[in-house]
């Protein structure tokens, strides 16, 4: 591993200043970054630890919704009762990222900024309507999570910019969500397919009033399956409808063949997972 300077600023302004230098990299939990530095996939002269910055550690639910600081660990998210109640797909995703040691270090912000096509939290964030708050030398901007990643390991962040938090609207009425992935092993593996979905039902629980389905590991980046969402609105939350939604999702993906699964297998699994994830999200919504 090449030598680097280590900085640990306690203010956002300080972090942006350090990150504006070329070859400076933010470090949250380090579960991706340290390995990438070790293997030479990432080169940095300065590593900027962002965990002491108050804005990146915010974790609160208020009348506007959830504010999730980019450096908050998966473990803290898993243990948050309000998130489990209102944003359960986030809990679902954080519970399966690595094991206990990884969850204690890893952040959802880091998972998103690493921008892997199979990142487990990203489809959940998209399904929940998350919005990224990004701070940099030119000020602050907000971008929907589905527009953040631009390709494998690529995103919209410019030099000196930092993801500070992700904001989510407060779910209304009979609304809930779910995230599930398929992996060949029981745990500690990368998603072959990952699906996040949120579903809102009318007061009687008989009609879908809104839906967001996000697919991971089946394209160059996780994405919002808008055609599936459009199909679902106005439909009854039945197995037949969710099976049809899975069929539509199969037509939207461009999976690769690799040692974890062929494109044909990934396409089949996508249909099955979309049906199952929508069924669970709708059942959770109906119970509200
Ligand atoms: C054993 C093991 C198992 C794993 N299992 C899974 C799994 O099941 N599912 C899964 O999705 N991932 C898994 N991972 C990957 C990893 O744990 C996640 O991607 C993690 O969420 C990254 O978060 P972090 O805080 O450790 O990020 P870091 O490693 O600190 O950072 C990751 C990248 O994002 C950048 N970055 C971090 N925070 C910010 C920010 N706020 N603004 C701008 N850039 C930022 C860093 O510079 C770096 O490029 C696993 C990793 C290991 C080692």
Image (cartoon, helix red, strand yellow):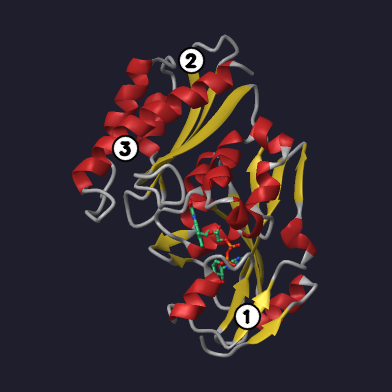
User: Disc 2 and disc 3: Cα gap in Å?
Assistant: 24 Å
Identify which residue, 99 or 148, lies in the foreground: 99
User: Disc 1 and disc 3: Cα gap in Å?
Assistant: 38 Å
| Neighbourhood count class around disc 2 (C-alpha, 10 Å): few under 14, some 14–19, many 20 upward | some
Q: Position of residue 93 (x, y in %)?
A: 54, 43
| Neighbourhood count class around disc 1 (C-alpha, 10 Å): few under 14, some 14–19, many 20 upward | many
Q: Position of residue 143 (x, y in %)?
A: 56, 56
Sequence-earlier tag: 1 or 3? 1
Sequence-earlier tag: 1 or 2? 1
Identify which residue, 192 or 87, lies in the foreground: 192
Q: Which residue is mark 2?
A: 207
Say what secondary structure mark 1 lies in: strand
Numbered-mark total: 3
Q: Which residue is mark 1?
A: 47
Q: Which residue is mark 3?
A: 270
Q: Which mark is residue 286?
A: none
């Amino acid at each position: 591993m090449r030598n680097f300077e280590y900085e640990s600023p306690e203010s956002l302004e300080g972090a942006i200043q350090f990150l504006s230098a070329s070859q400076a990299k933010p470090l949250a939990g380090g579960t991706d970054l340290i390995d990438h530095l070790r293997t030479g996939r990432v080169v940095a002269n300065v590593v900027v630890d962002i965990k002491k910055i108050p804005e990146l550690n915010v974790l609160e639910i208020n009348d506007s919704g959830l504010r999730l600081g980019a450096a908050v660990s998966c473990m803290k998210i898993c243990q948050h009762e309000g998130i489990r109640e209102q944003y359960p797909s986030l809990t679902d995703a954080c519970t399966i990222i690595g094991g206990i040691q990884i969850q204690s270090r890893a952040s959802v912000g880091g998972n998103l900024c690493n921008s892997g096509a199979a990142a487990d939290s990203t489809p959940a964030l998209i399904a929940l309507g998350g919005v990224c708050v990004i701070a940099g030398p030119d000020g602050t901007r907000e971008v929907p999570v589905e527009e953040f990643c631009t390709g494998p390991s690529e995103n919209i962040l410019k030099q000196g910019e930092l993801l500070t938090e992700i904001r989510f609207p407060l779910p209304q009425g009979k609304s809930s969500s779910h995230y599930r992935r398929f992996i060949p092993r029981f745990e500690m593996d990368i998603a072959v397919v990952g699906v996040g979905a949120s579903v809102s039902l009318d007061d009687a629980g008989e009609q879908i009033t809104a839906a967001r389905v996000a697919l991971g590991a089946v394209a160059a980046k996780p994405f919002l399956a808008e055609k599936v969402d459009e199909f679902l609105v106005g439909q009854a939350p039945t197995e037949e409808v969710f099976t049809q939604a899975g069929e539509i999702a199969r037509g939207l993906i461009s999976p690769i063949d690799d040692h974890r699964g062929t494109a044909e297998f990934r396409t089949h699994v996508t249909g099955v997972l979309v049906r199952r994830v929508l069924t669970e999200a709708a059942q959770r919504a109906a119970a509200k």
